[in-house]
Image: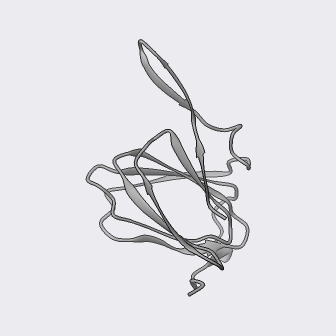
Amino acid sequence: MPKLIKIKTIKDTRGSLGVIGEDLPFKIMRTFFLYDVTKERGGHRHKSSTQALICLNGRCDVNVQTQTEDTKFSLQDNSTCLILDPEDWHTMNNFSNGAILLVMASEPYDPKDYIYEPYR
């Protein structure tokens, strides 16, 4: 079941510092980011990989389908992190100009971990 968590942010006269790591429900084993996106991304779920998504710049939508419901999350605040469980089928689209989506995963890349069929 997808869930939003707030990222700890420390602000002072020098600027802001976002801290993530111990707030995640998993150890980070893979990190990647999407940018200059022109078409829908994702379109899968996983067998074992949990993911954390943060839109570092701009905005994008993450559409999540579970066995029982469909939910759309608009990520546009870099102090918010969306946690996706392995069974959360998801797509990412509507990237604004200059959007950067950071993804942290609990597992290294394995093509056998991907399931491409949506629930509906």
Q: Position of residue 97 (x, y in %)?
A: 26, 53
State which quadrant residue 117 falls in.
bottom right
Q: Tell me: 51 left or right of 79.
A: right
Q: Tell me: 12 left or right of 118.
A: left
Q: Position of residue 17 (x, y in %)?
A: 50, 26
State which quadrant residue 88 falls in.
bottom right
* Residue 111 in view, yes or no: no
Residue drawn at 58 percent across, 40 percent down:
6
Which residue is more in the foreground, 28 or 85? 85
Would you place residue 89 above or below residue 106 in this image?
below
Would you place residue 22 above or below residue 69 in this image?
above
Residue drawn at 56 percent across, 75 percent down:
44
Q: Residue furthest top?
A: 13
Q: Position of residue 16 (x, y in %)?
A: 46, 24
Q: Position of residue 27 (x, y in %)?
A: 73, 47
Quadrant containing the N terminus in the rendered view: bottom right
Which residue is more in the foreground, 37 or 92? 92
Q: Tell me: 119 left or right of 42.
A: right
Residue drawn at 66 percent across, 38 percent down:
21
Image label count = 0
Q: Give the colour scheme shown.
A: one colour
* Residue 75 in view, yes or no: yes
